[in-house]
Image (spheres, helix red, strand yellow):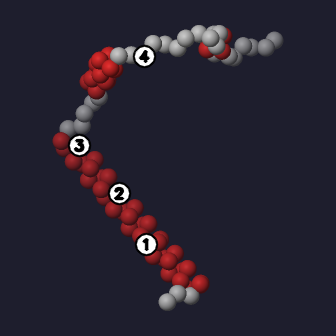
């Protein structure tokens, strides 16, 4: 016995019209409502998060720069550089 796994949208006729677009005012009200649900970080949390991100970025820049220097040196030794 086969199980019907298709969703509800598969049963709708293809000629059915799409939902009506929302007005810009309604869209703006929905944005404001969603932003009110956000738990905003405190100043202390924001400073600590920013510090962590900056340190991580600096570490990654160091790693990428080091690998770039090593690979550049390797390519120059293999192919002979000036």
The answer for how far apart the CA atoms under marks 2 and 4 are is: 43 Å
Task: Name the front one of labels 4 and 3.
Answer: 4
Question: In what element is the residue under mark 3?
Answer: helix
Q: Which residue is drawn at 72% across and 13% down?
A: 4
Q: Which of marks 2 and 4 is in front?
A: 4
Which SS class for mark 1?
helix
- The answer to whether marks 4 and 3 mark residues whose Cβ atoms lie closer than 8 Å is no
Nearer the observer, 40 or 10? 10
74 w.r.t. 50: above or below? below
Find disc 3 in the rendering and name its residue. Answer: 45
At horizontal 32% and vertical 52% (from top left) the residue drawn is 53
Characterize the local packing of mark 2: few (<14), some (14-19) or many (20 or more) Cα atoms within 10 angstroms.
Answer: few
Q: Position of residue 74 (x, y in %)?
A: 54, 80
Position in image of residue 18 (x %, y %): 52, 14
CB under 8 Å between discs 4 and 1: no
Q: In this image, 11 relative to 82: left or right?
A: right
Ranked by sequence position, the earlier of labels 4 and 1 is 4
Q: Which of 47 and 25 is in front in this view?
A: 25
Secondary structure beneath label 4: loop
Mark 4–mark 1 distance (CA, rounded to whole Å): 52 Å
The first of marks 3 and 1 along the sequence is 3
The answer to which of 35 and 11 lies nearer the viewer is: 11
Query: CA separation, marks 4 and 3?
Result: 39 Å
Q: Give the residue number, with chain letter if any, for mark 4.
A: 21
Disc number for residue 56: 2
């Amino acid at each position: 016995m086969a199980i019907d796994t298709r969703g509800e949208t598969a049963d709708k006729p293809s000629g059915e019209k799409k939902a009506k677009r929302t007005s810009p005012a309604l869209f703006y009200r929905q944005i404001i409502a969603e932003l009110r649900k956000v738990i905003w970080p405190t100043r202390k949390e924001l400073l600590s998060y920013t510090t962590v991100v900056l340190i991580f970025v600096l570490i990654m820049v160091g790693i990428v720069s080091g690998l770039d220097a090593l690979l550049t040196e390797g390519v120059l030794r293999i192919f002979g550089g000036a």
